[in-house]
Image (cartoon, rainbow, N blue to C red):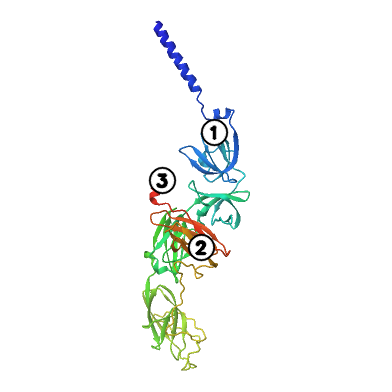
Amino acid sequence: MRKNVLLIFTLLLFSLTACAGKGKVKVYDSSTEDISQYHTEESLTAVMIKRDTETNDITFLNYVTGEQITLGYHGGVSVTDTYGNNLIISDLPVGSVVDITYYSDTQRLISVSASDNVQVVKNVNKFSADVSNKKATYKGTSCKLSEYALAFEDGVAKSIMEVNTEDQVTLYLMNGTLISCVIDIGHGYARLINQDTYVGGMVEIGYDVIVPVTQDMLIAVREGTYTLRINNNGYASSKDVTIKKGEETEINIADIAIPSGTVNFIVTPAEADVYVDGKLCETHAFTGLYGSYGLKIKADGYKSFNGSIKISEPVKNHTFELVVDEDATTEEDTTEDNSEVVTDENGNTITVTSSEGTDNSSDDTTATASSTSENDLTTATYTGATENTITVKTPVGAGVYVDGNYVGYAPVTFQKVVGTHTIVLYQTGSLIKSYTIQATDDGKDDEYSFDDLTTLTDLINIDN
C-alpha cells in the first residue's frame, strides 16, 4: 500500500513540474503581446512591397528614405480598411500604401490599415514614367515621381520603367508625388508572320495600338482578346487574336494575305504608254495586289490621262481612248487638258482625274518610295526626329525593338525621336521584357543598360 501511495505522489509531482515548465514559454499572440511591458512600439506609413506566406513575413518600404523593413505577421494582427472595417491581409494588395504599427524590438506587426492619407487613382491608361526627370504622366496630367517608386505586378516588385503604356494601372500618390504603381491589366507581345503583302500598311490591335507593318515586328499589346485589323493600299482584312500576359503570340497573316489581280489595258492609240504607280507596263498589262494604284496613259499627239485604278478581282479588262491634242507640237507635249476615261467592256466607268501642266513623265519613270533601314528610324516613319541618338548597350546580344520595329542586336544605336517609346528586348530561350523610355530634344545622346533577360532555365530553377 505504501508503495502505491509513493508512486501516486511521484507522478503528481512530475505532472506539476511539467506544467510549471510550459508556463515559462513565451507565446506571441494577440493577448500576451499586448501585456508585454518591455516592447517598443513604432508607427509608419509605407508601401507594402512583399508578402511571404511561407515565413509569414511582410516587407515594407519607407517611401521617404527608401529603407525597407521586414516584420512578422501573426493571426492577432489587426487589418482594416480606411473606414476601420476588418479585412484579411490578402485584401490589401502588394504595392498599396498602408499605415502600420509594430514592435521594433521583436520586429512583429501589431496592426495594418489602408492609409487614408494617400491619393489612389484607378483605371489609368497610357501611364508613363520619366525616371531621369522624376516625372510621371497620367490622364493628361503630370506629377512628381519618387526616386524610390516601384511598380508591382502579381505581387512582385519591378522597376517603374517596366510599366508599359498598354498596361492599365492603379497609382498611389502621397502629397502629389507618385510612390507606387500597381499593374491591374498587363501586356503580352504580338509577332506578325507572313505579313509580306501588308508591309508598308498599318495594323491595329489591342487597346489602341496602331503601327506600321514592317518585315520584322514585335508589338507590346494589352492582354485580352481583340480583332486585329490590317490594311495596305486600300485593301483591308481582320482576324481575332488573343494576347496573354508576358507571352509572345505569333499571328499568322497568311490566311488573310492580300490576293493578286491582273488588269489588261486596251488603249487607243495602241502605241500609247501605260504607267502604273510610275512604272511602265510594256505589255499593257499589270499584275499586283488588290488595292489602288496611280495610273497615267500618254502618247505623242494626244492628251494624257492622270488618274487611278483599283484592283479588286482576279482579272479585268479596262478600255481607254486618248483624245487628240490639236495644240500638240512635235517637240514637246506641254499641256494636259481634262479628259475622261472610256468605260470598259462591262460598262464600268473608271474614275480618272486629269490635270493641266507640263508632262514630266519619261520611259524611265520609277515609283517614289521611302524606306527605313534596319538600324535607322527616319522621319519617313516618325515625327520629332533629332540629330541625337539612343543606344541600348545591354543585355548584349538581345534583339531590340523600338515601338514594334526591329533595330538590331544590343549594343545598338538608333536615331533619337522625341516622345514616349517602348523598348522590347527579345532573346531566344528567355522571357521577353519591355521598358518605357522618354526621349526629349535636349541635344544629348541617351544610353540605356538594362538587366539581363531571365532565361527559361533560370525560371525553372526559381520555381523549383
Q: Is residue 138 left or right of residue 449?
A: right
Q: Which residue is mark 1?
A: 106
Identity of the residue furthest to the top in this view: 1
Sort mark 1 into few (<14), some (14-19) or many (20+) by Cα contacts within 10 Å. Answer: few
**Considering the numbered disc 3 on the image, is that residue within a helix, a strand or a loop?**
helix
- For badge 1, the amino acid type reads Thr
Query: In which quarter of the view is residue 137 placed?
Result: bottom right
Question: Alpha-carbon neighbours of circle 2 within 10 Å: few (<14), some, or many (≥20)?
Answer: some
The percent position of residue 237, horizontal first and vertical second, equals 42, 66
* 9 versus 434 height, above or below: above
Q: Are marks 3 and 1 in contact (CB under 8 Å)?
A: no
In what quadrant of the picture does the C terminus appear? Answer: top left
Most foreground residue, 355 or 415: 415
What secondary structure is found at the residue carrying circle 1? Answer: loop
Report x, y in % for residue 210: 48, 63
Q: Are marks 2 and 1 in contact (CB under 8 Å)?
A: no
Residue hosting label 3:
462
Q: Which mark is residue 390?
A: 2
Q: Secondary structure at mark 2?
A: strand
Q: Amino acid at mark 3?
A: Ile
Among the two numbered marks 3 and 1 on one chain, the one whose residue lies closer to the N terminus:
1
Q: Quote the CA–CA distance across marks 2 and 3.
A: 34 Å
Horizontal side of 85 relative to 252 (left or right) equals right
**Distance (Cα) linking label 2 and label 1:** 50 Å
